[in-house]
Image (spheres, grey):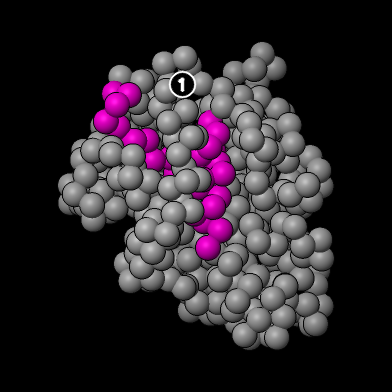
Amino acid sequence: MSYKQPDEHGYYGEFGGAFIPEMLYRNVEELRENYLKIIESASFQEEYKLLLSDYAGRPTPLYYAARLSEKYGTNVYLKREDLCHTGAHKVNNTIGQILVAERLGKKRIIAETGAGQHGVATATVCALKGLECIVYMGEKDIERQAPNVARMKMLGASVVPAKSGSKTLKDATNEAIRDWINNPNDTFYIIGSVVGPHPYPDMVARFQSVISKEIRAQLQEKTGTELPTAVLACVGGGSNAAGTFYHFLDEPSVDIIAVEAAGCGIDTHMSAAATQLGKPGVLHGSKSYLMQTADGQVEEPYSISAGLDYPGIGPMHANLFVTGRGQFLNATDKEALQAAFELAKLEGIIPALESAHALAALNKISYTKNDTVVVCLSGRGDKDMDTYMREMQNY
Ligand SMILES: *Cc1c(COP(=O)(O)O)cnc(C)c1O
């Protein structure tokens, strides 16, 4: 059995599937029938690779962090997704999906966004391809994330406020799904993580898998072996983690370590650690681990980092969790802030708050000077400077 890919019905073990309203069946079925044919075609691969290199800036460096390595007594490498165009790994996926949309003849692109990172990455590729772009975003998030709203608008996207519920990501996702139901023929929905109905989790994981493909080649060149001792990544929905783990999942010698956001702490009701606090349930089209109340309503998550503030995780990760293939750790807001200030001072790199959660886990594992630990630095910290300035005197 492979941990990388779902079965033909979209299941990773008991998780995944496509739980969708009848009215979405045609859209999802059209994608399911065509996505592999499209992705595997020579013309797609040629254009995808060219855009990844010349537009997104790949391969991203694998950087040996000497001072961090000294501090933790092991060899720490950082996979520099923060150096991608638009500042995070998300563009790997939106480039892939816009090329699929184009080949399916779609003219109108919709997306949901929380902090605005996926919205910006989607607006970017829509500008690149001259396609109409509508981004749904919670009204509260529009207020909180003004710079990203401005970026999306400058890139030509319409940003539509979601005014229902808590007016955040989950509500924006509901609005995007409603739009898709109403526009079944000309519209493509670009989902931002390894979540949603099959085939989205598999499609997004394939697009992000370029991360671990590059890590293998870069480690071979730098250390003489393709396999590290461990790979670490933060998990919101789980796309940067899926990409970082992908080509190591079926290599039993490699430790797979996922880091969730603990918020104020696991037992404070202010947390987003879905595996620790959740149980199996269905959200946004697939079965996975989900934070929910006793009667099955979705529990509001909390994390200082907007990108990890999601009540579930993708089905691939739920399977890694229950089978024990992956180790699931978590880091609090404070631990992540600590790790962000540490990286800035030791290596001269300001990480995204999300990525800082993965870095914080270096304190929670123990490896030796002969081991190799690769941490995915999923994004850069520019968008988090307000938070960092507020917290500066505490660290
Ligand atoms: C969106 C985001 C994440 C969380 O999303 P995943 O799908 O879990 O990767 C992590 N890091 C950064 C920098 C992000 O922008």
Estimate the x, y position of residue 235 in percent, counting from the top left: 60, 49
Helix, strand or loop for disc 1: helix
Estimate the x, y position of residue 104 in percent, counting from the top left: 33, 39
Q: Quadrant of residue 179?
A: top left
Residue drawn at x 48%, y 66% is: 81
Q: Quadrant of residue 190?
A: top left
Residue drawn at x 42%, y 23% is: 26
Residue drawn at x 79%, y 51% is: 325
Q: How many marks?
A: 1
**Vertical relation: 392 (above or below) 327:** below
- Judging by the rendered image, the residue that carries numbered circle 1 is 25
In-image side of 192 versus 347 (left or right): left
Q: Which residues are magenta?
A: 183-210
**Vertical relation: 361 (above or below) 271:** below
Estimate the x, y position of residue 285 in percent, counting from the top left: 54, 27
**Vertical relation: 363 (above or below) 14:** below
Disc 1 residue type (three-letter)? Tyr
Using the rendered image of the protein, determine whether residue 155 is visible from the camera's viewpoint: yes
Estimate the x, y position of residue 281 in percent, counting from the top left: 66, 25
Residue drawn at x 38%, y 46% is: 100
Q: Quadrant of the C terminus?
A: bottom right
Asked whether 294 or 17 is in front, the reply is 17
In-image side of 305 versus 269 (left or right): left
Using the rendered image of the protein, determine whether residue 385 is visible from the camera's viewpoint: no
Let me know if residue 308 is in the magenta part.
Answer: no
Asked whether 62 or 250 is in front, the reply is 250
Let me know if residue 194 is in the magenta part.
Answer: yes
